Image (cartoon, rainbow, N blue to C red):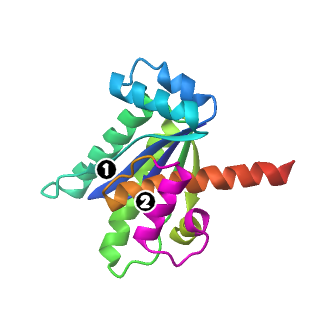
Amino acid sequence: MIILGIDPGYGKCGWAILAKGEKHKLLTNNYKLSEIEKSNLRVRSSKLEVSLVVCDCIETDPKKDLPDRLKEIYDAIEYIIKKYQPTELAIESLFFFKNQKTVMQVSQARGVIIVAAKNHDLSVSEYTPLQVKQAVIGYGRGDKEQIQKMIKLHLCGQEMPKQDDTADAVAVALTHLQTSKFQKTNTK
């Protein structure tokens, strides 16, 4: 299973690729990965069931109009999907924003991300910030620092991203892994 986790935004959009199970080997042999990415993945995959393959943040140019920024996001997501070939997208859903303009722009960014995913036949799952916190740290009132510490524990000490948006994308992907595992257990 290869998951693309997304913390959506139009200025900064965090993303992360997590791999679980046999997909480690598939990614390791993928010619599209750099040699550094391959060696890091091989080391991790021999020890872990879940690996953080790569994560980063898409940053759009604030001087550009919103449609151009949305296209930047769409193009970046297309590139990520083609390079890492995830089968599932986990994206954080919106919650209350004080600024109505911000919520509209983030909604539009989410839209282009979901369209890019569906254009590549990825399944799409959405999680609220509360669900993410509950899955990662066990309760819904944790702060960013607690989330990062727990992510590091979940990933057996792998290095954590510095940017909050990127760390949040990792947390969303982990939430999806835990939720899908739970759903499969309950459906048997």
Q: Amino acid at mark 1?
A: Cys
**Which region of the structure is painted magenta?**
134-157
User: Which image quarter: residue 47?
Assistant: top right
Residue drawn 46% across the image and 69% down it: 146
Judge the density around disc 1: few (<14), some (14-19), many (≥20) Cα neighbours within 10 Å. Answer: many
Which residue is nearer to you in this view: 149 or 168?
Answer: 149
Amino acid on which the number 2 mark rests in the picture: Asp
Q: Which residue is mark 1?
A: 57
Disc 2 from disc 1: Cα separation: 10 Å
> Is residue 7 toward the left or the right of residue 56 in the image?
right
Residue 128 marker: none
Q: Nearer the viewer, residue 48 or 100?
A: 48
Picture quadrant of residue 178: bottom right
- When the figure is inspected, residue 107 is found, relative to residue 80, above or below; the finding is below
Is 147 contained in the magenta span? yes
Q: Toward the viewer: 18 or 8?
A: 18
Tell me the SS state at disc 2: helix
Q: Most extreme residue toward the right, as rendered? A: 188
Task: Give the mark nearer the N terminus: 2 vs 1.
Answer: 1
| Residue to which mark 2 is pinned | 168
Q: Main secondary structure of the magenta part?
A: helix
